[in-house]
Amino acid sequence: MIALKTFTHKKRAFYYIIASLYYVFPLFIISVLSACASVPKTPPPDWVTDIESVFPKDTFLAEKGSGKSAGNAEIAGSRAIASYISTQVTRQLTEEARFINNGPTEIKGTDITAVVTHQELPPIRYTAAWYNKGESKWETVAYINRDEAWNIVYEPDLKPEKNAFLNMYAKAENERDPIRRYAIYQGTQNSYTQNYARRRAIATRINATRAGEYFADVDRVRAELPQKLDDARLRAVILINCNNDYENRITQAFEKSLSNAGFRIAKNRAEAIGIFAINVNWNETTRLINTSESFEFIPTLSASLTSTSGILFSYNSPAIPRVATIVRDVGLRRASTTLAAEVENSFPGEFRKKLASFAGD
């Protein structure tokens, strides 16, 4: 009887618990949902839908970046900036090269692919990263303040190059020797192309307004350079005078190198402003072996370029291997071929260095 009462009490308690859950659980769910509803949703930043409203183009260079983490989003943003500038710089430099090629000068231009590295850019800042739940990724904006970048990075960096370029041009304008003048004009053009054009192009992409103002005098000079080069080239005419040549091989080797350097080659003394004098020494030795002769040649040459201001350049050929033969003309032909090949190999580099030194003297 006692056991039956105990069981009845337990059963009644169980029913009470079930009944309580029936009424309490819905209230618990409602309270949880109400609490969740009361937590405000974080709206996306304004730049998510309209980047220019936060980063106007005339003030900022800005690109969005996204990734699995905030750090990855920043990396993507900085890469987007570098890629954009690379594309624009490539287009600008290629247009400049085509302009030069289509002009009257003989400056050689090539297609250019400019890959701008992060190190070449000014400091990049980033917005606070925002998590895009719909796409399950973090997003940010990488941006550069154009005026700040110009004032702190680009103008100070480019000022020495700008001054050097303008000073070199002024030096060419004041040079009276036609050959030196032509060389200095070439040096001025090459200085811009090799040391200046790329960084100036990057600076222009960062701040076109400030760059245009700052480089107005440089652009005026660059517009004048093609005609200045052509006028100077017309006067920088060189006559090659080779003593002791064989089958004109040495003369032709020097003519090719001087022509590749942009100089006109005179056919007679009257039209030349400079004389390129070459002296060839075949260092010929004849030996008698039994009743037959053999010939040995160890050729050398020295050369100098003289213009209105005196000797501008001197050159001595490197050592040439000994040539031995039993037929003299065959030996001379082999020796002259070897000597001409050495001229074509070693002379252009030395000559370019000397021409470059005129611009830097």
Image (cartoon, rainbow, N blue to C red):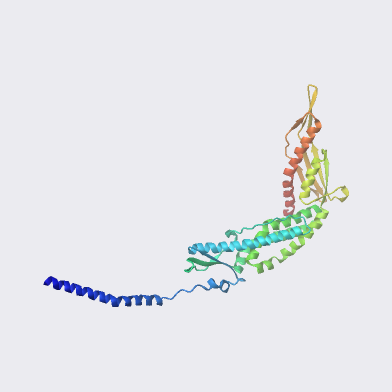
Q: Quadrant of residue 213?
A: bottom right
* In the image, residue 321 above or below residue 68: above
Q: Residue at x 76, y 53 (%)?
A: 183
Residue 330 at what x, y percent from top left?
79, 33
Q: Quadrant of residue 113?
A: bottom right
Q: Does residue 159 show up? A: no
Left or right: residue 169 versus residue 37 is right
Residue 9 at what x, y percent from top left?
17, 74
* In the image, residue 228 above or below residue 11: above
Number of marks = 0
User: Residue pushed farthest left?
Assistant: 1
Left or right: residue 103 versus residue 45 is right
Q: Residue at x 54, y 62 (%)?
A: 76
User: Residue pushed farthest top?
Assistant: 290
Residue 246 at what x, y percent from top left?
82, 38
Q: Does residue 94 show up? A: yes
* In the image, residue 349 above or below residue 110: above
Q: Nearer the viewer, residue 48 or 320?
A: 48
